[in-house]
Image (spheres, rainbow, N blue to C red):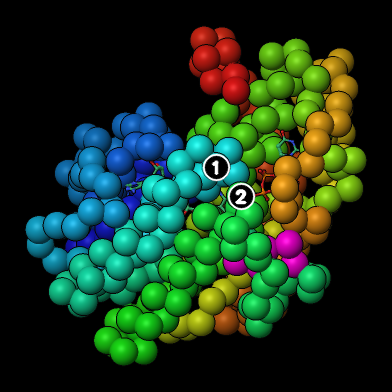
């Protein structure tokens, strides 16, 4: 049985990856310090003999007994309000955390896949973003702690690949959504759906003309799985290129939820990227991958998930 370590395994994406690797017949070790994650996301796996959970901060030395075939480094605060609240931990998990994972990979002779991000492109001057674009990041702006940690993480990963011969894969993930997102993580989808469910107005930042392109989580997981098993060590964008303005997105959520509330405009956060859309030519050519789930389908599933949360959770996780 192949063995995989998933850091950030109790988070939104990490927990979906745990499910996928279990389904593929792997022994899965999830490691998480629960700083933004939740054991609820993986509690259904606890009874399985091929699943283990380690409560550990990956910015500290990592010890895992036994063999490892793969390491997926997904530990990191991921939403702007999370990494603004815990900027130093964000920088540490992107730097010390990946160093520990790569060191562990050398000892175990394991392949490492890192969760990079479209944020390495910053507020992009090239549209849509190809992997060749080097980005437009403000290192000392509020988002710099996340963006620069991820850029460092890519550089460190490439250095271990080049100098130590470690097998590495880099996925640049674009905005992804689905069940198990935290209601109060501040990202636009849980913010809008939570507000609609509580009967509050939807808080659109700026005039809503900024764009994003949203990928359903199952599509992302499929892309990551294919990349891990491929022989391609350069970064690959995985995301859904169906671009939409945040204003249009808010209107879609209003229609989906049937709320009688409206969009209100709040100030745009500093350095908020004005446009974002992945160029997925590489993923198509190298992995034979493209997204399958439309936004209408994915939003419906995600809305059902949020609706199934208790009233208590809905209000406890309000902001
Ligand atoms: P999340 O906050 O739900 O998950 C992150 C997990 O990492 C949490 O369970 C958290 O407790 C854990 N973690 C954080 N610091 C840790 C540490 N020092 N030690 C151990 N565990 C730690 O966020 P997510 O959306 O699932 O994001 C997962 C990864 O994917 C992140 O690396 C993020 O940067 C990347 N990513 C996500 C998106 C997206 O749209 N969701 C986009 C681009 C990149
Ligand atoms: N946004 C918004 N209202 C919110 C939360 C976010 O209008 O309550 C906007 C935000 O300014 C950004 C877009 O939605 O332009 C996506 O934000 P998110 O935090 O989800 O992701 P990121 O900016 O990291 O892509």
Classify residue 66 by image quadrant.
bottom left
Where's the C terminus, which quadrant?
Answer: top right
- The total number of labels drawn is 2
Q: Position of residue 297 (x, y in %)?
A: 71, 42
Residue shown at 65%/78% (left/top)? 134
Q: Which residue is mark 2?
A: 142
Q: Is residue 189 left or right of residue 180?
A: right
Relative horizontal placement of residue 148, taking residue 90 as reference (left or right): right
What residue sits 24% from the left and 35% below the top? 46
Quick one: SS at disc 1? helix
Quadrant the N terminus occupies: bottom left
Position of 97 compared to 284: left or right? left
* Magenta span: chief secondary structure: loop
Q: Is residue 63 above or below residue 103?
A: above
**Quick one: SS at disc 2?**
loop
First-in-chain label (2 vs 1)? 1
Q: Position of residue 226 (x, y in %)?
A: 48, 70
Residue furthest to the left: 65
In which image quadrant can residue 167 be found? bottom left
For disc 1, the marked residue is 84
Residue, far front: 140
Could you tell me if the residues under marks 2 and 1 are in contact, i.e. CB atoms within 8 Å? yes
Front residue of 145/282: it is 145
Q: Measuring from the top left, give residue 55's x and y in whole percent.
A: 23, 40
The reply to whether residue 257 is in sight is: yes
Tell me if residue 223 can be seen: no
Q: What is the magenta range? A: 120-124
Residue located at (19% from left, 57% from top): 62
Crowding around mark 2 (Cα neighbors within 10 Å: few <14, some 14 to 19, many 20+) is some
At a point 23% along the width and 54% down the height, the residue shown is 60
Q: Position of residue 163 (x, y in %)?
A: 31, 89
């Amino acid at each position: 049985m192949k063995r995989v370590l998933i850091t950030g395994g109790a988070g939104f994406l990490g927990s979906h990856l745990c499910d996928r690797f279990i389904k593929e017949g792997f022994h899965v070790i999830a490691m998480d310090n629960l700083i933004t994650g939740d054991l609820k996301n993986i509690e259904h796996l606890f009874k399985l003999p091929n699943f283990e959970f380690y409560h550990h901060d990956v910015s500290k030395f990592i010890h895992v007994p036994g063999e490892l075939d793969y390491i997926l480094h997904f530990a990191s605060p991921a939403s702007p309000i999370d990494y603004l609240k815990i900027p130093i931990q964000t920088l540490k998990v992107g730097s010390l955390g990946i160093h520990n994972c790569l060191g562990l990979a050398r000892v175990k002779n394991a392949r490492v896949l890192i969760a990079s991000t479209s944020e390495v492109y910053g507020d992009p001057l090239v549209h849509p973003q190809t992997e060749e674009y080097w980005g437009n990041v403000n290192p000392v702006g509020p988002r710099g702690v996340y963006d620069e940690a991820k850029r460092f993480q890519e550089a460190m990963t490439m250095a271990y690949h080049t100098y130590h011969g470690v097998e590495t894969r880099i996925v640049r993930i674009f905005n992804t959504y689905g069940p198990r997102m935290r209601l109060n993580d501040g990202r636009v989808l849980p913010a809008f759906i939570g507000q609609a469910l509580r009967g509050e107005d939807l808080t659109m930042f700026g005039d809503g003309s900024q764009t994003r392109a949203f990928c359903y989580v199952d599509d992302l997981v499929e892309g990551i799985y294919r990349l891990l098993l491929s022989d391609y060590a350069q970064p690959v964008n995985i995301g859904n290129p169906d671009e939409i303005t945040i204003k249009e997105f808010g209107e879609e959520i209003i229609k989906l939820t049937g709320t009688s509330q409206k969009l209100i405009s709040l100030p745009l956060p500093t350095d908020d990227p004005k446009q974002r859309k992945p160029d997925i030519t590489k993923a198509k050519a190298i992995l034979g991958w493209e997204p399958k789930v439309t936004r209408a389908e994915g939003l419906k599933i995600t809305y059902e998930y949020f609706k199934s949360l208790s009233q208590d959770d809905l209000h406890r996780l309000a902001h």
